Amino acid sequence: MSEQTGKQLSKEEKDARFEAELLPVLDPLYNFAYRLTLDEDDANDLVQETYLKAYRFFDYFEQGTNAKAWLFRILKNSFINEFRKKSKQPAKVDYSEVEGYYNTEDVEGDNGVATTTDMRTESVQDLIGDEVASALNTLPVDFRTVIILCDLEGFTYEEMAKILDIPIGTVRSRLHRARNSLKEKLEKYARTMGYNS
Amino acid sequence: MEPKFTEMYQKEPAGEMDGACGQVADLLDSMVDGEATAEEQRFFNSHIEECVNCFENHQKQKLLKGLISGHLKRVIVPESLAQTIKAKIQETI
């Protein structure tokens, strides 16, 4: 949010611009909210709150600039400032729950590969998606956030720095640590599926 | 006490990487994210042509990024959400 654009919009103009420029971001915004809160109702509330704020501060939004980054920034701040406090559930999956899960799915030696080969491609894809999601969900929210912004939403480091209010150097190091942590979790899973890392 | 401490501090990290491999490792993220400069890309690409380890690390890093961008399911936005937002905005004015 930098300077005010100066000219006052009529309500009709404002509503039209709001719908044309900000509402198309609803899908990625909702997905981001869901990945932060890990709860559909919470994601719903967070997105509503974000759009209400965006409408209230719409005069500060410079037309033609990055609407997606602007909304992501508002949502991220809402999540930190208010939502996290209000929410009874911590925005984190209990680590031990997931950790135990991997250990119980023990594969019998090297024969584990056989079980994967006769699965249809689609279900393998689903399986991979589920595993990636659960590994991602066990990461601390700051790590999860940079991975989502970078790999799912394709923001640049510079945009991420603006969304998160941190220097680019911190974006880099946080992303690096987040990926190492995710890699560790996924390699563990790959081994249980009989793949060598 | 003092010399001991210094000694410990100067120890090389366990997985000793030579200079170039270390630099390449530091560039892995920038490379897969398309954030490396032209010069960094040249350095990186010429190194991984010769170094199997770094080549493999690059493949793994690309795979990891691909797992998120290609396999993480998107959640479906509730149909009513856009309408709810529009309605709430009108209420608050």
Image (cartoon, coloured by chain):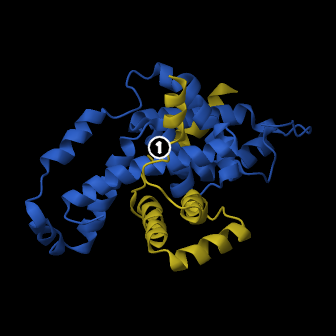
- Is B82 in front, or is A70? A70
Q: Position of residue A59 (x, y in %)?
A: 81, 37
Spot the residue most to the right.
Answer: A6
Kindly identify which residue carries mark 1: A144
* Amino acid type at mark 1: Arg
Q: Is residue A39 above or below residue A190?
A: above
The tint of chain B in the picture is: yellow
Q: Residue furthest bottom?
A: B49
**Chain A on-screen colour:** blue
Whether residue A31 is visible to the viewer of this picture, yes or no, is no
Please state, as top left, top right, bottom left or bottom right, where the N terminus of chain A lies in the image. top right
Relative height, residue B40 to residue A97 (above, below) = below
The C terminus of chain A, quarter of image:
bottom left
How many numbered tags mark residues here?
Answer: 1
Q: Secondary structure at mark 1?
A: helix
Q: Position of residue A11 (x, y in %)?
A: 79, 38
Q: Is residue A29 left or right of residue A44?
A: right
Is residue A118 shown left or right of residue A145?
Answer: left
What residue is drawn where x is 65% and y is 71%?
B43
User: Is the residue marked by circle 1 packed among few (<14), some (14-19), or many (20+) residues within 10 Å?
Assistant: many
Residue B90, visible in the rendered structure: yes
- Residue A177 place in picture, x, y as percent: 49, 46
Q: Nearer the viewer, residue A155 or A23?
A: A155
Q: Tell me what residue is drawn at x 68 percent, y 49 percent.
A: A159
